[in-house]
Image: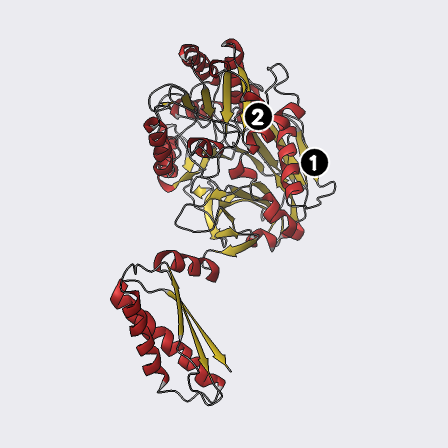
Amino acid sequence: MNKREQFLFCPLGGSGEIGMNMNLFAYGNTGNQKWLIVDIGVTFADDTVPGIDLIYPDPGYIIDKKEDLLGIILTHAHEDHIGAIAHIWPQLKCDIYATPFTSVLINEKFKEKKIDIGNRLKIVQLNGKINLGPFEIEFVTLTHSILEPNGLSIKTPSGMILHTGDWKCDPNPLIGNTINEEKLKEIGQNGVLAMICDSTNVFSPGRAGSELDVRKNLLNIMKRLNKRILVTSFASNVARMESIFYCAKNTGRQISLVGRSMNKIFKAARQCGYLKNVIEPIDPREAKKISRDKIVYLCTGSQGEPMGAMMRITNYVHPDVFIEKGDTVIFSSKIIPGNEKKLYKLHNQLVKNNIEVISEENEFVHVSGHPNREDLKDMYNWVKPRSIIPVHGEHRHMMEHINFAKEMQVPFPVQIENGDIVQIYPGKEPHVVDKAPSGRLYVDGNVSVSEDSQSIKERKNLANNGYLEITLIINSKGKFVKKPIFSFKGLPIETEVEDFLFDLENEVQKTTKSFSLNSKKQENNLIEAIKISCRKIVKEKTGKKPFTNINLVRV
């Protein structure tokens, strides 16, 4: 074996943040390396970036190497692992490998975008194997909060790594198999150069908990309720979905699915052979005819999303679902950090309307899909890695994971962030050898733009400072034909508007006198001068420096 051969790992997203996971692996001689992408996800924008919903990793580094890219491998179907595929794949046009349930949802994404991928999507059976160039890849069934989560054993001529993806130890996952403990032990016995591992819950003691325990408690809660019940949860958690069907049946209620993604996931699960033995859901329009004590609604919008079904129901603008005093809403999901404000607003609105709110804050109605410390201990004891590379976490999570690995006697923990290129082999211990360009792309309408794009800067400016437009109508001699026309939006001028406009008009006329408009350059100079002087006036009067546009019209 050529000693110059390298086994490399590089995260482009998901290391130093939760979400937006995208990881690269490479093997071969310098200049002749073959590459893999593992996962290709998004994160969701907050209200600091107006007009933006989705953000994904900048794939430029791997696009430059696409001739040596062997494929994209997807560990599971959560948006933070597959959500960017339709945005990035057209620039790569490589094969995609996923298990059946993930494949159904991937196909839907490409159909929505009207992208033809031909036969590029390759379905891998659970616990299946694929060979791509120097890589022997084995899918290892794990448990998580979605169907068919997989770890990946990636073997090369110089050794093997385990990429865990998202996982936890659930002894009773309800749908799908339990964690493939025997395979993980076998991988550990064969020697693992490095384990690349989920860090999300590293601060949480004990175990993440089981879906079976949540089901039992949900049933006890729903047995005591005698009015309309609405449950909101992550649509992707099919085991939780099945639990709500189970509870509905066992409390003598019908069930109705509300929200596009809830129906989409239900159909995808059915298509893959899951949810075969549950009662049939009824259309929300039909559910209106059923008495309050005989219906359960399972809704999207568990994070208070403005257009989610739960928000629309709470604001009484949903066409088919109505709630009233005495009804109960169960939030069977985690309150994701960053969403507290909009979620508590939703909770408060419900409580104000005399609707009971049950959430993880006051009842046991949710378990995480990520490993707590005892789960992590199990994985370390099975796999026995020589090195640990924490991913899927903010910097504080990954640093705590490094400390945890040291407690577990792992010889070579490696602290990384997005863009770090880690040499797993050769060498006694994996270490960062280089830095790849990394960053974020924002989905702005139908276009992907960079973090510092003009469109985002301008929209932030508009959101923060408002808008001022001035139209100047002049003749061929450069004289005003009529007074300047002013228009403004978002400026805090409630009274004395006439005085405000009078001051602006004076400023425009005063500035214009010093310019001779005989050339294009002079026109541009005048526009810039008026822009500066008018913004200064507005700043003095309102404290705002508006986005300003000057129209110069010759007649």
Q: State the image coordinates of residue 475 (x, y, percent, origin top left).
A: 47, 86
Q: Nearer the viewer, residue 239 or 370?
A: 239
User: Hey, what amino acid is under mark 1?
Assistant: Lys
Total tally of numbered discs in the picture: 2
Residue furthest to the right: 119
Image check: 364 left or right of 10? left
Q: State the image coordinates of residue 142 (x, y, percent, origin top left).
A: 54, 25
Q: Is residue 546 above or below residue 62?
A: below
Residue 57 visible somewhere in the drawing: yes
Q: Residue at x 52, y 23 (%)?
A: 143
Residue identifier under label 2: 285
- Determine crowd level at label 1: few under 14, some 14-19, many 20+ residues with C-alpha closer than 10 A: some
Secondary element type, mark 1: strand
User: Hey, what amino acid is under mark 2?
Assistant: Arg
Q: Could you tell me how far apart the alpha carbons at marks 2 and 1 are, in whole angstroms?
A: 38 Å
N-terminal-most mark, 2 or 1: 1
Q: State the image coordinates of residue 467 (x, y, percent, origin top left).
A: 39, 63
For the N terminus, the quadrant is top right
Residue 180 visible somewhere in the drawing: no
Q: Nearer the viewer, residue 458 or 500?
A: 500
- Determine crowd level at label 2: few under 14, some 14-19, many 20+ residues with C-alpha closer than 10 A: few
